Every structure is written in C-alpha cells, then in structure tokens.
C-alpha cells in the first residue's frame, strides 16, 4: 500500500508517478509530545515522500522490495508499483516515445556476476567495516533492515538458549539469501523492460567502430541495453536460479515445500512446489 494522498509527482512535463488506488492518511489527529517525538525512530532513509521525483520513486521501490522482508514488501507488487511511473501523452507527438521506465530502470540492472560481486565483495566489506553512518541511500536502507532482522534473530536464539552461534555463519547465510532475492528482482526487472515499448533493438544500439581511446572514454554503461542483451542476461539469471535450485535439492532433500518421500494421494503436502517453481508460476507467468 502506498502511503501518499498527494497528486502525481512530476519530474518534467512527460514523466509522472500516478496516484495510488489506496490511500493512507498521514496527518496525525493527536499531537505528539516532545518526549514521544524524540523516541520516534528516524533511521528509515525515505521520509519526505512528497518531495521525491519519479527517479527517486523507482529507486525507493527497488530498495524497499530488496531489503525489507517479503512479509512487508511482497515481490508480486514490485512490477505493479513500478508501472505507476508513466508518461503524460503528448498530442503533438507523431510517434510514440519510448516508455519512461526504460531510462529509470537502466541504472538498477545487474548481471549475475555483478550480483555476486555486490554481496560477496561490496556488501560483505561494508559489514566488516561497520560503516553504519554512511550517507549512501542503499547502505542506509541495508543497515535499517539488518538491524531489525538481526534483533529478531538474536531474540530467537536467546529463547532457545543458543548464545554461541557464530556471527560469521549468520552473515554468510544472510548474504546468500539477499543475493538470491536480488536475482529474483533482476529477473522481474528484465522481464518488465522487455515488455515496455521503445526498448532498443540490436540494430538501434549498433554504433560505428571507435578507437580504443574513445571506447574507454565512452563507457557502455551509458548505452541502453538492447532486447538481445536483456534476453541474454535474463537467460544467465535464470541459469543462476537453476543452479541454486539444484544445490538446494542436494543439500536439503527434506526441505519444506518438497514432495514428501512416501506420500500418496491426499497425504501429499499442500504445495509441493519448491521456491523457484513458486516464483516462476506465481510471479513471472503472471507478468
């Protein structure tokens, strides 16, 4: 549910964020006391939502779905939330312009290798440095989510009397889980881009040969990926999911959601699909 009753946010005369069909009043009818104001948690990095641009909105939706738990930000709402960003049609335009989301989503795209490097190298180093005071928005979001997730985990271990679980193992499990969620989100973003009008074709992204010096000066990161590149990266991302699925089936043969070894008929589990089948059938196929 989006929390704003404000009119559509406009970054220019073309791109807007349409108002949400659901509204949650933000005005408090009872004034907070000074003590209550001081006790309010101000660590959440997204406060002034009425000031955000469509670019800020897309970044916030991505980060919230990535770092906050599935119970708060289900992935099934990711694409619907992003599609609120639209272009104001121009009567004078003779040909339809490319969808504005193409440029807004481009900075968020990651390859499978970049996903691994992000969590196994960069995020792992940020955790080791304990740079919780960083001004980076994504790092602030990470620390905000991590604080409460770690708190819940510590409470669970305290209730079980397990005070000696290595933080290293918890961190590695968490990094692996976050990398997997990143890959799921990247798959949805790639599918969304491929469905939008105006994504460049391979012929449109071809350019004349340039000297090595010019190629270094003009990085390919500034070029919108073509449909062929998006499809190729999507295939690599799906291959990564398949590898995780295979490894999970080998490591945890009796995991929840897997078919019971000796079950028959009505005695079978309610949902025998594994997590990858649930993702593909419940999210990807419904795009």
Image (spheres, grey):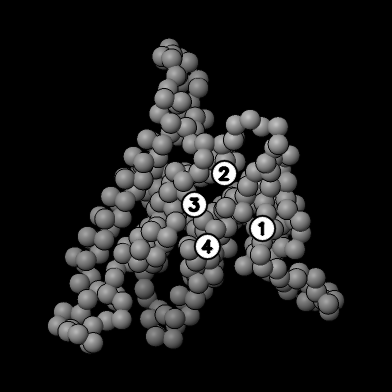
Which label sits on residue 46?
1
SS at badge 4? helix
Q: Which residue is mark 3?
A: 126
Circle nearer the viewer, 2 or 1: 2
Mark 3 to mark 2 CA distance (whole Å): 30 Å
**Residue 178: % across, % down:** 42, 59
| As drawn, 18 above or below 113 | below
Q: Earlier in the sequence, mark 3 or mark 2?
A: 2
Quadrant of the snapshot with the C terminus: bottom left
Circle nearer the viewer, 4 or 3: 4
Left or right for 27, reference 164: right
**Residue 283: % across, % down:** 42, 61
**Residue 122: % across, % down:** 45, 47
* Number of numbered discs on residues: 4
Q: Residues within 10 Å of mark 3 (few under 14, many from 20)?
A: some
Residue under the point 57% across and 44% down = 101
In terms of depth relative to the viewer, which is nearer, 58 or 128? 58
Q: Which residue is mark 2?
A: 101
Q: Which residue is mark 4?
A: 77
Are the residues flagged by discs 1 and 4 in contact, CB closer than 8 Å? no
Name, please, the residue furthest toward the top: 211
Q: Earlier in the sequence, mark 4 or mark 2?
A: 4
């Amino acid at each position: 549910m989006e929390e704003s009753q404000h009119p559509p946010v406009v970054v220019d005369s073309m791109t807007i964020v349409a108002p949400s069909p659901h509204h949650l009043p933000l005005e408090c009818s009872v004034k907070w006391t000074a003590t209550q104001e001081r006790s309010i948690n101000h660590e959440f990095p997204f406060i002034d939502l009425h000031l955000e641009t469509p670019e800020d909105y897309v970044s916030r939706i991505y980060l919230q779905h990535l770092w906050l738990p599935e119970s708060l930000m289900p992935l099934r709402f990711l694409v619907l939330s992003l599609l609120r960003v639209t272009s104001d049609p121009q009567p004078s335009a003779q040909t339809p312009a490319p969808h504005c989301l193409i440029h807004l989503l481009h900075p968020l795209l990651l390859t499978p290798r970049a996903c691994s490097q992000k969590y196994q190298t960069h995020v792992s180093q940020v955790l080791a440095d304990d740079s919780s005071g960083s001004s980076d928005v994504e790092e602030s979001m990470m620390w905000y989510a991590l604080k409460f997730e770690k708190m819940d985990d510590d409470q669970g271990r305290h209730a079980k009397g397990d005070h000696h679980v290595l933080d290293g193992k918890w961190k590695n499990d968490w990094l692996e889980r976050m990398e997997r969620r990143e890959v799921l989100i990247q798959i949805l973003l790639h599918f969304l881009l491929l469905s939008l009008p105006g994504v460049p074709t391979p012929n449109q992204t071809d350019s004349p040969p340039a000297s090595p010096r010019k190629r270094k000066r003009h990085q390919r990161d500034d070029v919108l990926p073509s449909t062929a590149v998006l499809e190729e990266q999507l295939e690599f991302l799906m291959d990564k999911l398949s590898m995780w699925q295979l490894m999970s089936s080998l490591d945890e043969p009796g995991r929840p959601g897997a078919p019971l070894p000796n079950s028959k008929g009505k005695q079978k589990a309610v949902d025998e699909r594994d997590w990858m089948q649930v993702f593909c059938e419940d999210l990807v196929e419904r795009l």
